Image: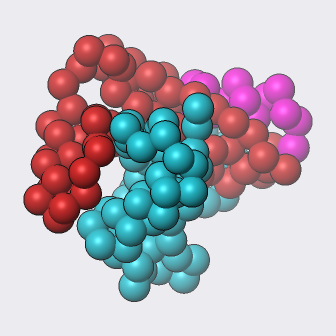
Chain colours: A cyan, B red
Amino acid sequence: MKARVHITLKSGVLDPQGKAIAHALGSLGFAGVDDVRQGKFIEIKLTEQDRGKAEAAVKQMCEKLLANTVIENYTVELVG
Amino acid sequence: MKARVHITLKSGVLDPQGKAIAHALGSLGFAGVDDVRQGKFIEIKLTEQDRGKAEAAVKQMCEKLLANTVIENYTVELVG
């Protein structure tokens, strides 16, 4: 089973990396870019076959290692 | 309109960051982690309302700035 995890900054948290991308896009001539936010995308291949257990495990991974829950949100999506 | 862009390393390209995460998860006691791949997730708010034009613009942004197409794949998804 595969888990797709998105980790994004909470709204209101400053995102300098996103701002830099927005600025660079402007410099390259791309108009009409309102805002850019950059997050992380992590794909985890698990041996666990039980959907419920896999989801619980990945949420634990996010809480303990992958996300900084003070400033970041995470979503877990199971595939296959 | 909002674009969600996923940038992932092509398969076969070494992903040291993913390996580090997999190792750290193992150290934390998470068993059953086969493989971890880390990518980027970028949300772009666009003023463009035309779906086709927005998608074309975001693909251009990926080619020119966001992705290194030698080692990375990208997918563009439009929301709203």
- Report if residue A21 is visible in the image: no
Task: Indicate the quadrant where residue B16 lies.
Answer: top left
Q: Relative to the observer, which residue lies in front, A63 or B42?
A: A63
In the picture, measured across the screen, residue B56 lies left or right of residue A21, that is right
Residue occupying the far right of the picture? B50
Position of residue A39 measured from the top left corner of the image (x, y, whole percent): 45, 56
Task: Indicate the quadrant where residue B3 lies.
Answer: top right
Position of residue A73 measured from the top left corner of the image (x, y, whole percent): 50, 71
Q: Relative to the observer, which residue lies in front, B7 or A3?
A: A3
Give the answer, above or below, for where B66 lies relative to B21.
above
- Report if residue B36 is visible in the image: yes
Residue occupying the far front of the picture? A50
- Magenta span covers which residues? B49-61
Q: Residue at x 48, y 63 (%)?
A: A56
Q: Relative to the observer, which residue lies in front, B52 or A27?
A: B52
In the picture, measured across the screen, residue B17 lies left or right of residue A63, that is left
In the picture, measured across the screen, residue B48 lies left or right of residue B12, that is right
Q: Is residue A63 magenta?
A: no
Give the answer, above or below, for where B79 lies relative to A28.
below
Q: Residue at x 63, y 44 (%)?
A: B4
Q: Residue at x 17, y 40 (%)?
A: B19
- Most common secondary structure along the magenta stretch: helix
